[in-house]
Structures are given as C-alpha cells and as structure tokens.
Image: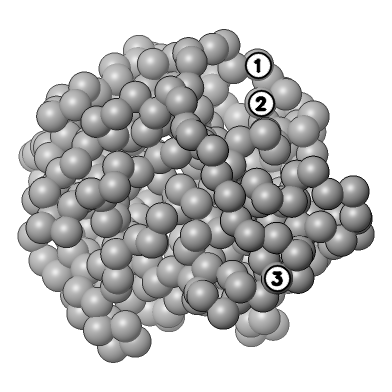
C-alpha cells in the first residue's frame, strides 16, 4: 500500500506553489470502476501516466557479516489533471516523488531521505516501456529479470541489484486489487517477492557489502480509498521457505476495518487470495513517537487464512517524516514474522499510515 493521491498528501504551501507554478487549479472528473485486464510484462513494469497515481515500492532485509539492515525505496508518480492540455514544457503534468530509508538494526537507527520534482528536463522521468525511473540522481531500473536501485542520499547510499527467483504475483483478481466497498476503489497491483538481493549499503561513509531478500510492489489507480478511510496497515513478508504473505486493512477514524485483503503464495507456487473479512489486525504493543507524538502498534497479531501470525518491528522507531515531499508522517519498517507456534518464519515490511494525522485525499 502507498498514498493513493500523492499530490493530495502535499503540505498546503508546497501544493499551492506547485499548482501556481503550473498556472492551474487541480481538477478531477468522475471515477469509474477499473476493468479486469491481463497485465503484460515488461510493459506493465513501466509507468501508466493516464492513471492518477502510481508507485513502485521495494523493501527488503540484507546483512553484512553480523550487521543487519532493512531498506526501502519508493517512487511515486502523480498526474496533475489540470495541466494535461498545456503545450508548455514547464507545465507540471506529472509529479515524481521518491522516499528511501535504511534501518540499521544493530545501531538502532533509521536513516531517511526524500525527493520531489516535476517530470522533464532530464531531472525526473518514468518510462512507459519498462521499469526505468529517475529523480535527481536516484534510479530504479529493470533489465530482464534483474532490477537495480542506485541512490546517494544525505547520510546513506544504496547500490543494490534484485534478481527474480519466482514469477510475478498478481494481487486480487488477476492483478485487480479491491481496496474498498465501492468497485471504483481498486488498483492494478502485482508483487515480486523473494528477490535475491546483493550490492552495497553505505552509512555515514562506511560501506557494507550485503546480501539478502527483497520484495517489489507496483500499483496504479484512479481512486483507492473510501471517504471513511483514514489510514491503513499493510505487511509484505518473505517467508524463509520461499512463501510470500501479503495482508492489509484500511481503517476508519474509530480504528475499524473499512476493507481488508491480501494473499498467500506457497513455496510451490499455489496462490490463495484472501476475501473481505478474512484478515484481522489486532494490536499487541504500541510505541509513541517523540517526533510526532503519534502512537503506533509495533507488534501485531494478524489473522489470515494461512495462519495467525505475530508481526514484530525489529526496532520501534521506524517513523518516516516525509512532510518535505508527500506531506505525510507514517511508520514503515523492517519486521519479523512469527507463526502460531512461536517460530520466526520470515521477515518483511510493516507499513502504517494515518496515525499521526488522517490521510487527506
């Protein structure tokens, strides 16, 4: 899961500056339900600029000797409807955002950075042919069955390669993932779990050669959230036996589920999509952020048709402050997956939004 409308998440002053610079007012037409369709690769690795919002999301776990790390890189693309008819090269027709973070487990610290720019002028781009994204020195690209992420940030850097070991996992109904009680609240959504990962991470000038596993999500949508939804809880977990678990719920202001879903794919490749009502998130332990004063559940009991799991953050403080780009504060970090027998069976990422403040869509 990712912000459904990246432009709407912008802080008001930044959003006004972008819209005024483009000489437009935001506009949006009626949204219709998305049809089921066959996703085609490598084309659908690429951007879909006719859709309002899109994101590519890589998370993972890597190690270098006794040092363990989590990492995430997300590129967002947001279509600005009111500029589409403008001929000027300066019109902000597409906005590109990116977030990146590294969790240093032994150092008990999260490193985070962000970028934003309008598409064009060789500063920001999102290819429609395959996965080829660029934003001010950051990049995410595909070449065959290998994908690469390279980025220098303020205090850290990534140079990682991700090799597919399994086929694409189509979420929902053959890649059409329902996200709310109305049919129009849906996205095209696929995952690439169990990516073999290698390369380097750098923290404060110290370089670590690492290996591990990663997970890639790619979604694009016209409308994702029901008006009553204020945030979501989501997990994407690589299990040690080669299985893959996705589970999510969208919450209202009282914390009740507006919608839920996910999937489990076994190591043998058997896919089991979850139906509405089959996923339940129950908080076990909470942590209060000294930055935002938001309280996040950092340990969950997650009931799915596959098993009842415990999801536990490896460190509590993995809150990201992205107010300089998407305007949101949210929690996203490396977590352990523990089965109903108390055995750790995998690792992956937990994402929680709408706790610092309701999502503004």
Determine crowd level at label 3: few under 14, some 14-19, many 20+ residues with C-alpha closer than 10 A. Answer: few
Q: Which residue position is annotated with label 1?
A: 40
Looking at the image, is mark 3 or mark 1 nearer the viewer?
Answer: 3
Q: Which residue position is annotated with label 2?
A: 44
Question: Residue at image x 19%, y 26%?
Answer: 276
Q: Which residue position is annotated with label 3?
A: 20
x then y, percent, for residue 183:
34, 24
Whether pointer 2 and pointer 1 mark residues with C-beta atoms closer than 8 Å, the reply is yes
Whether pointer 3 and pointer 2 mark residues with C-beta atoms closer than 8 Å, the reply is no
Residue closest to the eye, 345 or 187? 187
The tag earlier along the polypeptide, 3 or 1, is 3
Determine crowd level at label 2: few under 14, some 14-19, many 20+ residues with C-alpha closer than 10 A. Answer: some
x then y, percent, for residue 349:
38, 52
Of the 4 image quadrants, the one containing the C terminus is: bottom left
Q: Secondary structure beneath disc 1?
A: loop
Quarter-of-image position of residue 266: top left
Q: Secondary structure beneath disc 3?
A: helix
């Amino acid at each position: 899961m990712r912000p459904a409308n990246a432009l709407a998440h912008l802080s008001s002053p930044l959003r006004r500056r972008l819209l005024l610079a483009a000489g437009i007012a935001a506009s949006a037409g009626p949204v219709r339900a998305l049809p089921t369709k066959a996703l085609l690769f490598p084309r659908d690795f690429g951007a879909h600029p006719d859709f309002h919002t899109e994101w590519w999301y890589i998370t993972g776990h890597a190690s270098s000797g006794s040092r363990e790390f989590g990492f995430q890189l997300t590129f967002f693309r947001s279509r600005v409807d009111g500029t589409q008819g403008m001929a000027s090269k300066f019109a902000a027709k597409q906005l590109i955002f990116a977030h990146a973070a590294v969790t240093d487990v032994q150092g008990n610290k999260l490193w985070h950075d962000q970028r934003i720019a309008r598409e064009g002028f060789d500063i920001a781009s999102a290819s429609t042919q395959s996965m080829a994204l660029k934003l001010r020195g950051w990049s995410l690209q595909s070449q065959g069955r290998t994908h690469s992420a390279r980025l220098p940030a303020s205090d850290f850097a990534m140079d990682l390669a991700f090799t597919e070991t399994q086929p694409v996992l189509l979420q929902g109904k053959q890649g059409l993932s329902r996200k709310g009680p109305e049919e129009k609240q849906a996205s095209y959504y696929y995952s690439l779990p169990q990516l073999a990962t290698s390369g380097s991470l750098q923290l404060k000038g110290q370089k670590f050669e690492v290996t591990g596993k990663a997970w890639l999500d790619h979604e694009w949508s016209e409308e994702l959230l029901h008006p009553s939804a204020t945030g979501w809880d989501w997990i994407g977990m690589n299990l040690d036996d080669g299985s893959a678990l996705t589970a999510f719920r969208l919450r209202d202001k009282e914390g009740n589920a507006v919608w839920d879903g996910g999937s489990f794919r076994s190591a043998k490749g058997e896919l089991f999509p979850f139906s509405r009502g089959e996923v339940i998130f129950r908080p076990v332990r909470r942590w209060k952020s000294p930055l935002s004063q938001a309280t996040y559940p950092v340990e969950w009991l997650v009931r799915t048709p596959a098993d009842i799991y415990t999801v536990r953050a490896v460190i509590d403080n993995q809150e990201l402050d992205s107010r300089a780009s998407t305007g949101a504060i949210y929690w996203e970090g490396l977590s352990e997956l523990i089965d109903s027998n108390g055995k750790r069976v995998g690792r992956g990422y937990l994402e929680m939004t709408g706790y610092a403040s309701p999502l503004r869509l």
